[in-house]
Amino acid sequence: MAADDVKDFKEKLKNVLIHKIALTKINCTRNVNLTYLKPLQLQSIQGAMKSDALIMLPTGYGKSLIFEMLGKMNNTKCIIISPLNAIIEEQTRKLGRKAVNVNSALINSLEGPEAADFKDGKFEYIFGHPEQILKKEVCTIFKQKSWENVSHIVVDEAHCVVQWGHDFRPDFRNISKLRAILPQAKILALTATATPKMRKEIQQQLCMKDVFSLSGPVDRPNIKLIVQKRLPLTGGKTTAEGSYQDVLNPYIEELCSQIWNVPKTIVYSKLKWCGVGYDMVSQAARLEDNTDEILSAVSQFHAPCTDEMKKNIAQNMADTHGSIKLLFATQAYGYLQEIGRAGRDGRQSSAYMHYNMSDIATNTIVQPEVREFCLLKTCRRKFLSQYFETKVDLDSILKHNCCDVCEKECECDHCLVSEVEKCEVIDNCQCADEPDCTQLKEMLESYFNAENDQINMLNQQLVTGLTQTLCDKIVLNYKDIKCEEDIQGLFPYVHLKQHYLSNILLIVQTLN
């Protein structure tokens, strides 16, 4: 073996051992059993060891393990700047005594003995918002000799530097000031979503030099992308609450009817609608025998929640056996970050986006690309990969698992069987187009509206159970309805009042 080959072999063996030792340390600290690094994790670590690095990897890939490894491999410190408390708390909890959260409580106690370990540089991972990390008193501590072994300044969710740094949270654009305080530290910017233009701006704002750049696929192949139109707000027929209710009704009905068999679901919306959604579930739960059980399966996650509440919710959602099945959360980061919360265990999952034309009108602040995504007639996954200039292996994804557009083109055995079954159902339900059915539908809708109007609450249909879905199902099955039990049997988990059943039966009997 040539001398150069021997030298190369020794270098590779040395790197393998360093990685193995670092993984062993992490396993001991976190009580886990990590045995290997994913290919892009390894490349990211190798690049970040040599220079500043900008890493774009999909949500759920394991970006946090990259900075964990960097600290363990060199026995150095990492300062991690993150935008949200939930992320910081999750990471500090995971890393235990090796990590500290530079929050307001710590900063206010810097003169006391409880902050001694922080001032002496005894922590390996230092987390905080840019607003806290850049405070004068904190930066003064970073100038001390005990902080000379900070190897990396990590900017997690680095796209916030561009999206938030202009006016919302200006300190995101001041992170580069840490370079003057810690000149030996390299910058590691991590994100799951950044266009080429954004990546260039991130590098400029963070004053990154000789940048190692790695862009993995943004795609999560086990998440099906579905876009659905919700009720319009034009014409005065539908209120904003009614449109929101129409979207949520199927999820709430499923939760009430089969609480322990429903998949974990996160509903992202503005803060106001989190409360409205929770109230809708509460109203529906009061009509069920297991009210307390249903209410224990729903929660909210947003800024007004206490840190303890957020911690408990995060742990519950991360647990596959956790009690929370339906979580209302405020919007965070962007579309890819939100859908990336699904399918973390690798199982097939679905991401729904609901919109109406008012949401994406040209006079709104919605980006043109979002408007185009909603109105697509071609593959949604391909659109995202082209927008972020990353690759996606569409051939490896069954069309019915890709997106709602591709699903219509799928010709796999499963879909062919489903189409045959649909045809059989249509043959059995031809009555829906008959004149009698049209008349019945109009009569039922008029009656349902009259009963719902008597309920002085926001979500009348959830209180009465007289929904459009029930109306349609009665119309399809009206020839088989002979008694009140037949009506109740169509929706066994919605307990209709006795006089509702009696009146519906009278209406049906006018045709039968």
Image: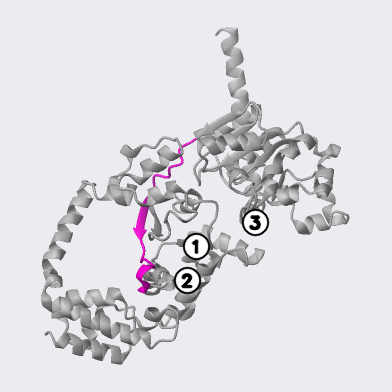
Mark 1, other Cα within 10 Å: few <14 / some 14–19 / many ≥20: some
Tag nearer the camera, 2 or 3: 2
* Residue 14 as seen in the image, left or right of residue 131: left
Mark 2 → mark 3, Cα distance in angstroms: 23 Å
Mark 2 lies on a secondary structure that is helix
In the rendering, at what x and y percent does residue 81 appear?
A: 67, 46
Mark 3 → mark 1, Cα distance in angstroms: 19 Å
- Closer to the chain start, of discs 1 and 2, is 1
Label total for image: 3
Q: Nearer the viewer, residue 151 or 231?
A: 231
Disc 1 + disc 2, Cβ < 8 Å: yes
Q: Is residue 166 magenta-colored? A: no
Residue to which mark 1 is pinned: 269
Residue to which mark 2 is pinned: 277
Span of residues in magenta: 216-237
The amino acid at mark 2 is: Gly
- Closer to the chain start, of discs 3 and 1, is 3
At x 49% / y 79%, what residue is drawn? Answer: 292
Position of residue 118 relative to residue 71, above or below, is below
In the rendering, at what x and y percent does residue 367 appear?
A: 47, 49
For the rendered model, the colour scheme is one colour
Q: Nearer the viewer, residue 449 or 131?
A: 449
- Closer to the chain start, of discs 2 and 3, is 3
Mark 1 → mark 2, Cα distance in angstroms: 10 Å
**Splitting the image into 4 quarters, where does residue 242 fall?**
bottom left
Q: Is residue 348 visible?
A: no
Residue to which mark 3 is pinned: 85
Q: Is residue 229 magenta-colored? A: yes
At x 29% / y 46%, what residue is drawn? Answer: 399
